Amino acid sequence: MKKRLKKIWKWLDDRGGLSDLMKPLTTHLVPPESKWNYVWGSATLFCLILQVITGITLGFLYQPSADVAYQSLVYIENQAFLGSFIRGLHNWGASAMILLMGIHMIRVYINAAYKYPREMSWITGVFLMAFTIIMAFTGQLLRWDNNGVWSAVVAAEQIGRIPWIGHWLAYFVLGGETIGGETLNRFFALHVFLFPALLFLFVVYHLYLVFKNGISEPPKIGRVVDPKTYRDWYEKMLSKKGVPFFPNAIWRDAVFSAFVLIIIVGLAWFVGATPLTSKPDLASVHANPKPDWYFTWIFALYALMPRQLESYVMFFGPLIAGVFLFSIPFMSNRGERSPLRRPWAVAGIVFVILSIGSLWYVGTKEPWSPRFNAKPLSKYATVPDPSTKVQKGIDLFNTAGCIYCHRIGNHGGIRGPELTDVENRLTRKQMIIRIVNGGNNMPAYGGSLKKEELDEIVSFLIAKDKK
Ligand code: HEC
């Protein structure tokens, strides 16, 4: 038996060149001190592989067509063999990948591993980050339930507000002026064909660069990077005390990835994927979309910002962030790598983490979503001496749902502007135009309010001393 196996191996190795294929791994040397802090990247890669496997598995049953997508997901979730578990793996795998990628980036940044000669590793990494975020974003819509669909649509509408190119971009992403069946097919093609292919290409190149330039040695105070001498120094250091990547370093990657797998499996099995909400109602935005956790902070940022700034931030925010990320290795590709000697760089990243953290915290509280439990305005206490018309207006303000989004005195949601003093800002005519046409997250009421009802609401809004 053993002899036969040996023979098979010999044949495979001779004709298939297996040990030659493995050779780069066993001969590639890495700095001996690169220990547990170096596992984040490989764990991210591991999650990507898991996503590919579970994604293909889901693809066996998922139907990317607006009529049946939701049913196919209900089937996967409730009936298909292991369907719910595999959906859970894909869902938690996505979260794990984003989290590990973030930690990997922070680790690289704090150790300044992007300095000479590894600038390209950083740049391809920024592309990988963008692709991963796009994957998470497009995947959310494929769920094709109310939450996934409207989260994606809200984001697409924000894209639409980017000056100059926004409208075109939103049209392209949605496959039309508004969401519809085409949107699902577009997102499916992006999520399943285009971006996985891009991810794959960039990952291969990213890994090639790791092999070509070597893993960065842990920084040491006073050991500065000088492009003139670095490569020589690195080679010498490796030949003196380097250890083979396989098996001396890779076992940590394997152990950590196994640990990540256990956690993902546990969460998928015991907690499961994000629950499906109801079938999407493409005609009404009455859903209160809750994006997946990694986007909550972006929702929070836009919700908290003064509305006039939104379009600019939408455009310049990602642009500046992108330019900044790409320029990091060009701004400083030499000198000290130790975080202890780069206090400003460290302060910067701490600032970014704190900002995102607090936005995220606010995001989970969602001040901008309509408050469906808002206490109705009282007809008598709200305006001094109301006429019947105004009283009717107050009733309508409650029943038509204005109160969910607009605050008057101490009552109401804060998704829209407070209307306590709206009579000082807008004329009667402007209010009517606003209410009839809606816009910017305000639903249009032209179709649902009768002329006299509109008149009653506006009479109430124009009244002085509301509280
Ligand atoms: C889903 C949330 C939501 C509901 C429900 C809603 N609004 Fe609004 N409303 C908004 C938002 C958001 C804006 C700001 C739009 C903008 O920035 O242009 C707004 C703007 C307005 C404005 C202009 C205020 C200003 O200061 O510019 C008026 C007036 C108004 N709404 C009245 C109403 C009335 C009356 C109703 C009920 C019939 C109502 N809204 C229902 C979200 C809502």
Image (tube, rainbow, N blue to C red):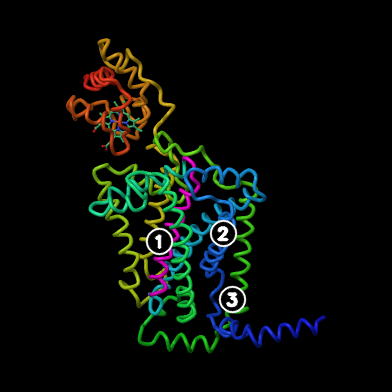
The amino acid type, in three-letter code, at marker 1 is Ala
Residue drawn 48% across the image and 80% down it: 214
Tell me the quarter of the image containing the C terminus: top left
Q: Residues within 10 Å of mark 1 (few under 14, many from 20)?
A: some
Q: Which residue is mark 2?
A: 56
On screen, 191 above or below 156? below
x, y (%) of residue 12? 67, 83
Pointer 3 or 1: first along the chain: 1
Pointer 2 or 3: first along the chain: 2
Q: Is 178 situated left or right of 287 in this image?
A: left
Q: Is 238 situated left or right of 396 in this image?
A: right
Residue 130: mark? 1
Residue drawn 56% across the image and 53% down it: 92
| Highlighted range, magenta | 120-146
SS at circle 3 = helix
On screen, 121 above or below 156? below
Q: Which residue is mark 3?
A: 249
Residue 128 forms part of the magenta stretch? yes
x, y (%) of residue 124? 40, 70
